Image (cartoon, rainbow, N blue to C red):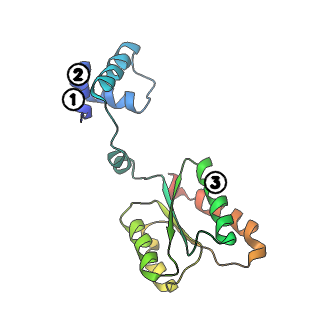
Amino acid sequence: MANIKELARMAGVSVATVSRVLNNHPYVSENKRNAVEQAMKASNYQRNLNAVHLSKGKTMLIGVIVPFVNHPYFGLLVEGIANEAVKNNYKLVLFQTNYEETREIEALEMLKHKQIDALIICSRNSPFSVVDDYTKYGPITCVKIAEKKICLLLSLIIKKLFSSTELFA
């Protein structure tokens, strides 16, 4: 599989020019842009999203922990979170834990290892002290409310999470 150095060689341009084309930078001549795009097509170039995420420091993924996906309460929460995530170009990684602490820890470990940018815990079995140990690795929001206040709290969660300067910097 071709990398940007090989694309640059094939197109007869610099690696910086290839990077500018890949990132839709406006200051690339039409001839050079076409040459890079032809090289991409000829080599069947596919961006390595892991490398992109590493270079940008973001995965554009938010983890959501729920005990069960088929419960109406959690379904409503996930739907609202998903709607806001889409508006902000984020995708969700859903963790169904069945109230097993080891599965909750797996999600927390993904935050620690930068595989997700943030975590929303809709219900938990792990003690708060365990969750608190992971807050240094990224934003974590815990949901624990009465069913009648879902919409109000959901709005606050979304506002808090999606206005986080760490998440969208």
Q: Is residue 148 left or right of residue 109?
A: right
Amino acid marked by disc 2: Met
Q: Earlier in the sequence, mark 2 or mark 3?
A: 2
Quadrant housing residue 14 = top left
Disc 1/disc 3 C-alpha distance (Å):
39 Å
Residue 95 placement (x, y as % from top left): 49, 68
- Asked if labels 1 and 2 touch by Cβ distance under 8 angstroms, the answer is yes
Mark 1, other Cα within 10 Å: few <14 / some 14–19 / many ≥20: some
Looking at the image, which residue is at 64% across and 70% down? 74
Pointer 3 residue: 84
Looking at the rendered structure, the number of numbered marks drawn on it comes to: 3
Amino acid marked by disc 3: Glu
Looking at the image, which residue is at 21% across and 29% down? 6
Secondary structure of residue under mark 3: helix
Residue 5 placement (x, y as % from top left): 22, 31
Pointer 1 residue: 6
- Asked if labels 3 and 2 touch by Cβ distance under 8 angstroms, the answer is no
Residue 45 placement (x, y as % from top left): 31, 32
Q: Which mark is residue 50?
A: none
Disc 2/disc 1 C-alpha distance (Å):
6 Å
Secondary structure of residue under mark 2: helix
Q: Is residue 116 visible?
A: yes
Looking at the image, which residue is at 25% across and 35% down? 3
Pointer 2 residue: 10
Q: Is residue 163 visible?
A: no
From this viewpoint, which residue is outermost toward the right? 148
- Position of 77 relative to 143 (above/below): above
Secondary structure of residue under mark 1: helix
- Position of 108 relative to 4 (above/below): below
